[in-house]
């Protein structure tokens, strides 16, 4: 990997700024990229200025590349946005859910900071009908498209994107970064694990790692409610979550509406039985059934003999996504399964789009869990803790994960990081994981959200400035609180002073 000196970086950055105006955004001035195992179908380049761009503050060369893997019958679309004013860096931008590629907003964000930004659709378009790309026919998964989504297309877009970026600017790329959350976080970890030379810095937020296990387990909350024969309203769930926060908030020394010490929180949902709740017209008292449901959801997926399968939610995380319910005016509620988990059970495990996952017996559930791990771990779990090659390539990686993540069980990332540390106790030198108490999936929640983790990653890669803590902030009663997220396993405790200042806390 090319590692120019800082002096050289500075010079080249100046040069590329000057050279930028001389670039021609047209296919004649770009080479046809080469990709081992791939064949280019079309390439197109159109200048987008601030009158036609999706954001008035950017102008860039919009390069589109379509290619196929001969014999696999796929057609993959890559978008490469090359800004007029380039900062010398390349950014691979990740997707979300079943969508391989980035949102337009994420691309704008990268380009407006001067990055050459690339993303790929992985060979399938965004659709709510997953079977339209995942299945060739009932009983038959499109394994090539699954593989494109899981790994292959991510490296392809990097190889192709880097060639075209360097040709366009006539200069080598100085540093390359991955930036993604959720599926994008999993993709970042896939790059570190399988394509360790591709990126100098990887920001892998709230990653959808351990896929073959956790996507199965995401149906567990619906299964629990179905087995119990009781679907609580979201208002009833919120009452229990609020009681948990009330009970465990102060374990870190400060009452601030956030549970930081989830491991020390032994709140039992059954202690909330009888508690009155109100949401608009809906009023009621927490039932024994709802408390039992929450108890099982927090415990996580379990086998017939009570054997651990996967983590549940820490107390305080909202239950509105995986234990979603909808209630009719007479007060009867039904479950609303999370689509990705339902797809996984129907399409990838049962291979039958008409299968109803609520109907599984415990024995069938256990078989499905095992089958998922057995068939798909090497394809998409992205749980390989051996980062030796990434470390050798000089890479740096940052992960943060919200403890109140409502979609991806926070403890799955703890599990992965523990395995990384087991393989290499010195892994913090190149891979740091920060827990974000009270933060939801990728953003949101009442806790402090990381402010600019990509900038901290860039400083770590380029200037050797180790991110001892991750800068974060939150708004409490209209006031901005600055906080510092701690590297796992240490966590932030309130010591004394103004809680709006990061210096009032210590990582212990
Ligand atoms: C677009 O760019 C031109 C040239 O840089 C500038 O004069 C103009 O103000 C920009 N328009 C907007 C809406 O930003
Ligand atoms: C970039 O080009 C592609 C292909 O021509 C087009 O579909 C897309 O809308 C363009 N994007 C922007 C932001 O102009
Ligand atoms: C993502 O892929 C879809 C489907 O191919 C496409 O419509 C969309 O323009 C792509 N987004 C970007 C930012 O390239
Ligand atoms: C989803 O796609 C499959 C395969 O293309 C098709 O058979 C099915 O009718 C579609 N379902 C819906 C609800 O559109
Ligand atoms: C989840 O992770 C936290 C560390 O942040 C730990 O204290 C807790 O015990 C874990 N929970 C489970 C169920 O493993
Ligand atoms: C619900 O709880 C309230 C307050 O504790 C109590 O006054 C009321 O009687 C309870 N309602 C029912 C239906 O149990
Ligand atoms: C819960 O289900 C309702 C009804 O289908 C839907 O409108 C809502 O968006 C879902 N909520 C979440 C967080 O998925
Ligand atoms: C309540 O309404 C739903 C949908 O309208 C209906 O299916 C259900 O039978 C009703 N339940 C009772 C107890 O009336
Ligand atoms: C954190 O600070 C940034 C500015 O640095 C601001 O844009 C953002 O809204 C703040 N976030 C919260 C949750 O207060």
Image: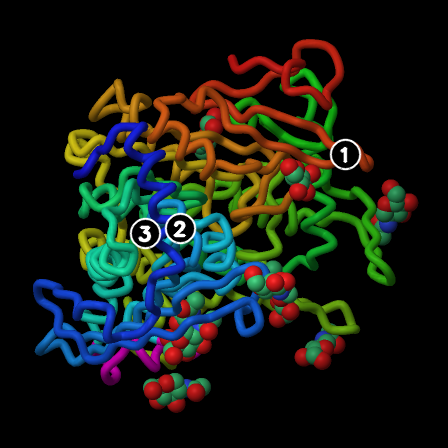
Quarter holding residue 153 = bottom left
Task: Using the rendered view, name the quadrant where residue 175 is placed.
Answer: top left
Q: Nearer the viewer, residue 128 or 347?
A: 128
Q: Quadrant of the N terminus?
A: top left
Query: Which mark, by number, is residue 86?
Result: 2
Are there few (<14), some (14-19), or many (20+) residues within 10 Å of tag 2? Answer: many
Compare residues 17 and 279 and report the one nearer the observer.
17
Extent of the magenta region: 125-140
Q: Residue at x 73, y 28 (%)?
A: 256
Residue that carries the numbered disc 1 in the rendered image: 476
- Identity of the residue furthest to the top in this view: 496
Q: Is residue 488 magenta?
A: no
Residue contact between numbered discs 3 and 1, judged by CB atoms under 8 Å: no
**Among the two numbered marks 2 and 3 on one chain, the one whose residue lies closer to the N terminus:** 2
Q: CA distance from mark 2 to mark 3?
A: 25 Å
Q: Position of residue 123 (x, y in %)?
A: 28, 73
Q: Is residue 38 left or right of residue 59?
A: left
Asked if residue 129 is among those painted magenta in the image, a careful observer would answer: yes
């Amino acid at each position: 990997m090319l590692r120019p000196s800082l002096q050289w970086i500075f010079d080249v950055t100046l040069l590329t700024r000057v050279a930028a105006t001389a670039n021609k955004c047209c296919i004649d001035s770009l080479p046809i990229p080469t990709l081992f195992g791939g064949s280019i179908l079309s390439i197109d380049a159109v200048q987008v200025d601030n009158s036609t761009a999706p954001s008035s503050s950017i102008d860039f060369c919009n390069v589109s590349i379509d290619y196929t893997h001969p014999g696999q019958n796929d057609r993959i679309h890559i978008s490469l946005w090359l800004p007029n004013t380039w900062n010398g860096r390349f950014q691979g931008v990740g997707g979300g859910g079943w969508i391989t590629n980035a949102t337009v907003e994420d691309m704008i964000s990268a380009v407006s900071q001067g990055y050459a930004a690339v993303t790929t659709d992985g060979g399938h378009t965004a659709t709510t009908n997953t079977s339209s790309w995942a299945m060739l026919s009932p009983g038959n998964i499109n394994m090539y498209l699954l593989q494109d989504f899981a790994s292959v297309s991510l490296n392809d877009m990097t190889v192709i994107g880097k060639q075209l970026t360097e040709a366009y600017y006539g200069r080598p790329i100085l540093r390359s970064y991955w930036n993604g959350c959720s599926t994008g976080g999993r993709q970042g970890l896939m790059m570190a694990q399988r394509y360790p030379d591709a990126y100098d810095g990887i920001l892998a937020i709230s990653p959808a790692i351990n896929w073959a296990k956790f996507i199965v387990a995401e149906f567990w909350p619906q299964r629990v409610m179905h087995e119990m024969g009781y679907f609580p309203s979201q208002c009833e769930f919120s009452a229990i979550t609020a009681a948990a926060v009330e009970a465990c908030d102060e374990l870190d020394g400060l009452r601030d509406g956030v549970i930081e010490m989830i491991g020390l929180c032994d709140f039992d949902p059954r202690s909330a039985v009888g508690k009155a709740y109100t949401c608009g017209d809906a009023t009621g008292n927490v039932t024994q059934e709802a408390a039992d449901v929450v108890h099982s959801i927090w415990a996580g997926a379990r086998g017939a003999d009570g054997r651990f399968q996967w983590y549940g939610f820490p107390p305080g995380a909202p239950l509105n996504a995986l234990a979603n319910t909808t209630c009719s005016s007479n007060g009867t509620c039904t479950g609303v399964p999370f689509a990705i988990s339902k797809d996984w059970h129907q399409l990838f495990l049962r291979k039958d789009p008409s299968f109803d996952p609520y109907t599984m017996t415990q024995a069938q559930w256990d078989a499905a869990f095992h089958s998922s791990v057995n068939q798909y771990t090497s394809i998409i779990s992205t749980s390989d803790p051996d980062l030796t090659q990434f470390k050798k390539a000089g890479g740096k990686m940052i992960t943060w994960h919200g403890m109140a993540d409502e979609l991806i069980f926070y403890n799955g990332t703890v599990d992965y990081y523990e395995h990384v540390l087991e393989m290499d106790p010195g892994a913090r030198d190149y891979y740091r994981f920060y827990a974000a108490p009270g933060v939801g999936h990728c953003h949101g929640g009442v806790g402090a959200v990381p402010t600019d983790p990509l900038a901290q990653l860039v400083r770590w890669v380029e200037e050797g400035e180790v991110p001892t803590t991750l800068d974060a902030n939150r708004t409490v009663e209209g006031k901005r609180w600055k906080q510092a997220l701690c590297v796992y396993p240490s966590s932030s405790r309130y010591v004394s002073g103004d809680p709006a200042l990061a210096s009032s806390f210590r990582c212990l």
